């Protein structure tokens, strides 16, 4: 059992730096956030204890519930549409066609772009008055999109841009995953008379499940936390708060609207949500994914 | 025993030597003061030049400008930094933060700065509406710096193309609406009008008709408890705005400066925007079309005349600066009030030159004849009144949030929702915020 016979304390020394970093940068701020969530902060920094009021008002606030609802829809779209599209593209680029490497790189490079840059690009392309796409669409259909005022347009824009940004990353992992699917299994399926469709769903997809499970988790984290940069650049949460997702609302409430207490309460709740999602995903991915060949 | 004492003494001597050495080197270095600001775009270079010139002529003083983000972020960061004891000596705060800064207990009111240094300074030299805006009980609380107001920018070529007289831009909202329809009909543009800072345009519309935004004397006689709208005026105004949105005359242009792009590329004819965009717009447009400017539109003469609002920002000083630092800050403030500096600042940004002397110098050198667009905002704000609470500008603690709620209402209206319901909802939200803010003072 004793792996370090003559060095009883060595393991503790070795993990100490990580523990210190975690305590200082994670545990301590988290404890502070919990404390803050029971207070209201005046614009000049005084704290006033308000008990559970921040939490009670949070769940009673139509704006918060709206934000929660939109975040759930947004995440579902980013994960669902994003993974489906990436898997399709990954399948196409792993076919035996000329220039596979070119296509793979062409699809993957978008991940090298920061969400901020992607956001600026998309917001210019769809700018209501000078955007290229806006012009083309209004030329074809006569309808001009204005994502500054139309909540649905803004929501779709942000979602599409977020899916697009994550495409490269997802494709990259799917391509790697697909290349690891043993060819002899697929051949065996063909010989047994399985259609390509059946082969994909019965052989390839189950064997991809560790990759898929991993990507679901990464995309969830992306939708919940990393979409921030995109939102901040493209819509700033507007119009009419339609793109004010939970993480962005915390930032707006805490730093823009100077309601730190309320923002702290929201961040504690967001932590609970993400912790549950994470636990469920790790549980299902370790139990359900097919790791054996 | 003896050796321990000796060692301790040696250590003490060493420490002392280091401390004294530190002080000696510190004395040789210039006194540094950080200056947090939000001047982005073309204004950043102008500001850096002003600061660099000051540092060059004052070798023993050094102002260090730091761009800390948007106005909103600057305010939030100053507050957080103050609590952590890391705040800068000077911070630039937008007009929205005025009440919060007054209530903060973190600053030295501007009028006390010369007093504390045993000097005198004549605050009468600054343009009256600016002084009014930033004063409390007749004393100036922040140093006037980059003040602006809103005006209309218009594309004179568009008016000509639509058969309209470019010398007669719209003066009322009704006319604006009609002009817009004509421009669209003539096929010159698809949308005629857009705003920057839509929430501020709403505030401006009230002030322009001498109407108060909030109770308690527009927040100038006490902390307001509720906003004064929706009322008959906002009803009338927003009815026209709704119609303009419906007919495509008004296209909502985002929260801050997004609409400028549409104007500069000739997509719209009218832009309501801060004067601080003037130089940026003139430079970008160049000779592509003729940019002209005029006063903000009024609703009708049934309402009294007020004034457009002072916007932009002013400078606050932390109340924890040393006298030595305060001396540097005061010298810097005196420097930016110098006529040549104020003139340079105005010519390159479009912000008002803050002092009367600078205005005279500009007039004497023929600047306003040479660039009449630089005069528009002046004439507008100096020809209006500034002695009523309504025209001097409102003051409220949760102003930033209030603006966001007004913006939300305007976004709904631009998107075709019922204006009364939209505004009513936002008013209720703001009133709740006002109650919450006032709870801190109970």
Image (cartoon, coloured by chain):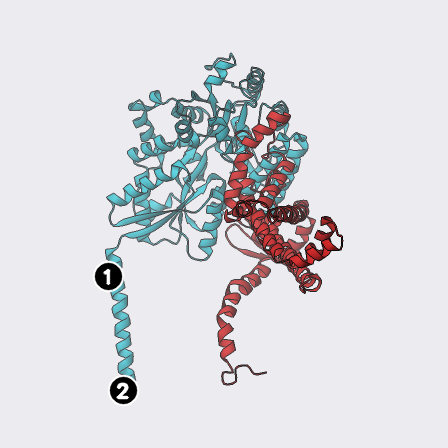
Chain colours: A red, B cyan
In this figure, which residue is indicated by the disc labeled 1? B24
- The N terminus of chain B appears in which quarter of the rendering? bottom left
Up/down of B356 relative to B224, above or below:
above
In the foreground, B366 or B427: B366
**Front one among B319 and A223:** A223
Among numbered discs 1 and 2, the one appearing first in the sequence: 2
The answer for how far apart the CA atoms under marks 1 and 2 are is 33 Å
Q: Which mark is residue B2?
A: 2
Residue A160, given in percent of the width and then of the height, sits at: 61, 41
Q: Secondary structure at mark 2?
A: helix
Q: Check the residue under mark 2 and report the chain it is in.
A: B
Give residue A136's position: percent from left, percent from top: 58, 28
What subunit carries mark 1? B
Q: Quadrant of residue B370?
A: top left
Q: Residue at x 51, y 35 (%)?
A: B256
Q: Determine crowd level at label 1: few under 14, some 14-19, many 20+ residues with C-alpha closer than 10 A.
A: few
């Amino acid at each position: 059992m004793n792996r370090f016979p003559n060095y009883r304390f060595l393991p503790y020394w070795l993990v100490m730096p990580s523990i210190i970093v975690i305590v200082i940068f994670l545990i301590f701020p988290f404890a502070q956030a919990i404390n803050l969530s029971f207070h209201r902060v005046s614009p000049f920094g005084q704290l006033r204890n308000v008990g559970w009021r921040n939490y009670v008002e949070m769940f009673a606030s139509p704006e918060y519930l709206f934000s929660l609802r939109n975040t759930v829809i947004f995440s579902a779209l980013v994960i669902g549409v994003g993974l489906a599209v990436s898997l399709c593209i990954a399948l196409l680029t792993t076919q035996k066609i000329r220039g596979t490497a070119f296509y793979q790189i062409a699809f993957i490079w978008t991940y090298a772009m920061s969400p901020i840059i992607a956001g600026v690009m998309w917001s210019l392309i769809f700018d209501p008055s000078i955007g290229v796409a806006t012009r083309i669409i209004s030329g074809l259909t006569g309808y001009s999109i204005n994502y500054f005022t139309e909540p649905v347009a803004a929501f779709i824009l942000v979602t599409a841009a977020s899916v697009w940004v994550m495409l490269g990353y997802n494709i990259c992992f799917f391509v790697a995953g697909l290349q690891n699917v043993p060819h002899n299994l697929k051949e065996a399926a063909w010989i047994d008379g399985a259609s390509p469709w059946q082969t994909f769903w019965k052989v390839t997809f189950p064997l991809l499940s560790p990759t898929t499970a991993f990507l679901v988790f990464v995309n969830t984290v992306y939708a919940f936390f990393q979409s921030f940069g995109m939102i901040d650049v493209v819509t700033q949460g507007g119009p009419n708060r339609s793109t004010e997702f939970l993480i962005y609302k915390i930032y707006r409430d805490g730093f823009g609207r100077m309601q730190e207490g309320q923002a702290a309460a929201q961040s504690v709740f967001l932590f609970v949500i993400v912790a549950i999602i994470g636990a469920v995903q790790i549980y299902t991915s370790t139990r359900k994914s097919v790791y054996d060949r | 025993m003896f050796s321990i004492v000796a060692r301790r003494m040696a250590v003490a001597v060493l420490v002392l030597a280091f401390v004294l050495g530190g002080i000696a080197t510190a004395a040789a270095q210039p006194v540094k003061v950080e200056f947090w600001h939000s001047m982005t775009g073309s204004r950043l270079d102008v500001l850096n030049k002003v600061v660099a010139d000051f540092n060059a002529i004052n070798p023993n003083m050094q102002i260090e400008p730091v761009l800390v983000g948007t106005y909103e972020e600057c305010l939030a960061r100053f507050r957080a930094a103050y609590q952590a004891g890391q705040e800068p000596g000077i911070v630039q705060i937008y007009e929205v933060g005025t009440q919060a800064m007054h209530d903060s207990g973190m600053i030295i009111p501007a009028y006390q700065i010369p007093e504390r240094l045993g000097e005198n300074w004549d605050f009468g030299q600054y343009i009256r509406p600016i002084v009014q805006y930033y004063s409390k009980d007749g004393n100036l609380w922040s140093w006037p710096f980059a003040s602006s107001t809103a005006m209309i920018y218009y594309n004179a070529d568009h008016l000509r193309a639509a058969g309209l007289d470019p010398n007669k831009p719209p003066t009322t909202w009704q006319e604006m609406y009609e002009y817009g329809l004509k421009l669209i009909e003539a096929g010159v543009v698809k949308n005629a009008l857009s705003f920057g800072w839509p929430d501020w345009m709403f505030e401006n519309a009230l002030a322009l008709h001498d109407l108060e935004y909030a109770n308690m004397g527009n927040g100038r006689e006490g902390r307001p408890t509720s906003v004064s709208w929706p009322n008959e005026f906002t009803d009338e105004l927003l009815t026209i705005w709704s119609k303009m949105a419906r007919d495509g005359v008004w296209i909502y242009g985002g929260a801050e400066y997004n609409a400028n792009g549409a104007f500069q590329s000739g997509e719209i004819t009218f832009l309501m925007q801060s004067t601080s965009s003037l130089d940026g717009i003139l430079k970008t447009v160049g000779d592509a079309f003729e940019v002209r400017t005029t006063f903000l539109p009024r609703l009708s003469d049934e309402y009294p005349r007020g004034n457009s609002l002072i916007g932009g920002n002013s400078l606050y000083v932390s109340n924890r600066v040393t006298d030595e630092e305060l001396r540097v800050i005061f010298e810097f403030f005196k420097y930016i009030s110098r006529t040549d500096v104020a003139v340079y600042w105005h010519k390159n940004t479009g912000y008002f030159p803050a002092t009367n002397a600078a205005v005279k110098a500009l007039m004497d050198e023929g600047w306003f004849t040479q660039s009449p667009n630089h005069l528009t905002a002046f004439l507008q704000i100096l020809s209006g009144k500034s002695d009523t609470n309504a025209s001097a500008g409102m003051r409220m603690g949760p102003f930033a949030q209030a603006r966001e709620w007004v913006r939300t209402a305007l976004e709904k209206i631009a998107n075709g929702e019922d204006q009364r319901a939209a505004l009513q909802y936002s008013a209720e939200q703001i009133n709740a915020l006002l109650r919450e803010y006032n709870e801190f003072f109970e």
